[in-house]
Image (cartoon, rainbow, N blue to C red):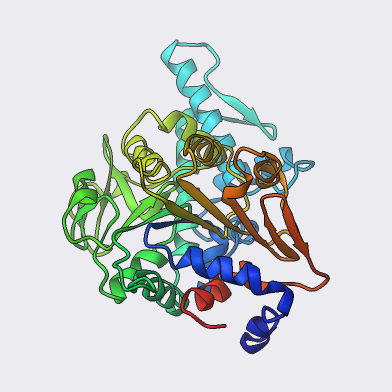
Amino acid sequence: MTQVEALAALRAPELADALHRLDNLIGHGQKCFLLGAGSSRCAGLPLTAELTEELLQSASLDEPSKQLLNAVRTQFADASNATFEDFLSEIVDLHAITQRRDARASSIRTVNVGGVDYDGALLQTAIDKIKLGISAIIGEKRTIETHRSFVRATHRNTRDGRSTGVVDYLVLNYDTVLEDALAFERIPYADGIDGGASGWWNPLVFDREGLGARVLKLHGSIDWVEQGEDVLPRRIGSFVQGGDASSRRILIWPASTKYRETQLDPYAQILARARSVLRPNFGEQRVLTICGYSFGDAHINVELDRALGESAGSLTVLVLTSEDQPTGLVKQWLDSPAIRDRVLVYAKRGFFHGGRSLTVDTDLPWWQFEVFTRLLGGER
């Protein structure tokens, strides 16, 4: 579907009301976004399933790490939509088992995967190599033009001339496409790192005056590293040789490990910020737009579900989904009389709000990030 055809498909008379509601929501002054992997697809970044295949071919993985990753993948052979995050989470869990055995001086301190015994050191090496592979793939040159258009449209004044205030982005991606776009558009933002090309973790930057955006990287970032025994992230310029470069580890969190990390900084601080964003102050109204997220992270789903249930009508959720119609958690929201009026779903084959549904026989592209960006910018 061409760019012209994409908008033409949305001009059908029966879609006018859905677009009017969308226009009112995205023009709201108090808005925030939850961005998943699908929102970076237009920048040339792979989706999670594609990244899994590329990772298995990555030159960053040595043979032992690749062998382990493939062995773990085999154990998910019958699983539905398993990705590298599941495999990495499994390896992290195995590493935790070896650590526990080491701490208790067990006589058996290895785990067997695919007929090979792995100790804690081998598993840690594999974890680090896999994260380096992810970073190498995601860190390749990408186009950010759509994201620049997105942040321009997001941060312009509302239709009645009011300032948008600070926009919060809850980002599930490891890449820095959004941060790059904000910088190119000269929108002051905070992501928790203080300094410049090299920096350190300082959550106080989220409260600085003059911000246009806060970027909450709920899964970590490819440009964050741990160094030595310091568990708080740093950003270290690619040409900086200071410190023990060999001890640097990419700071990203696969899904299952985030349950443990919620008690530790920086993740605990980021999550606390996200919870605050999803719970507007008394008397305020906020619109959360969810784009590019397939609702595959149980922890994130719990946070969204709780926030919507506890918001007392102050949070409206706009879901853009590639599914033909609502499924899973989103369907549960629409089936709940207590909250369904605050959930609007723009699906590939229809529009769903409260107890009302509009279904069509053709694909509607409004769920795509690049098309949503054009709608956000006022195109019709």
Q: Position of residue 261 (x, y in %)?
A: 41, 32
Quadrant in the picture for the N terminus: bottom right
Nearer the observer, 137 or 332: 332
Q: Is residue 152 above or below residue 54?
A: below
Q: Position of residue 190 (x, y in %)?
A: 26, 56
Q: Position of residue 374 (x, y in %)?
A: 52, 78
Q: Which residue is pictured at 35% across the width and 40% down the height?
A: 282
Q: Which residue is pictured at 61% across the width and 48% down the height?
A: 341
Q: Is residue 357 above or below residue 85?
A: below
Q: Is residue 38 above or below residue 280?
A: below
Query: Residue at the bottom extreme?
Result: 4
Q: Position of residue 16 (x, y in %)?
A: 65, 74
Nearer the observer, 265 or 160: 160
The answer to whether residue 197 shows anywhere in this view is yes
Quadrant in the picture for the C terminus: bottom right
The answer to whether residue 35 shows anywhere in this view is no
Nearer the observer, 146 or 9: 9
Q: Which residue is pictured at 57% across the width and 46% down the height?
A: 85
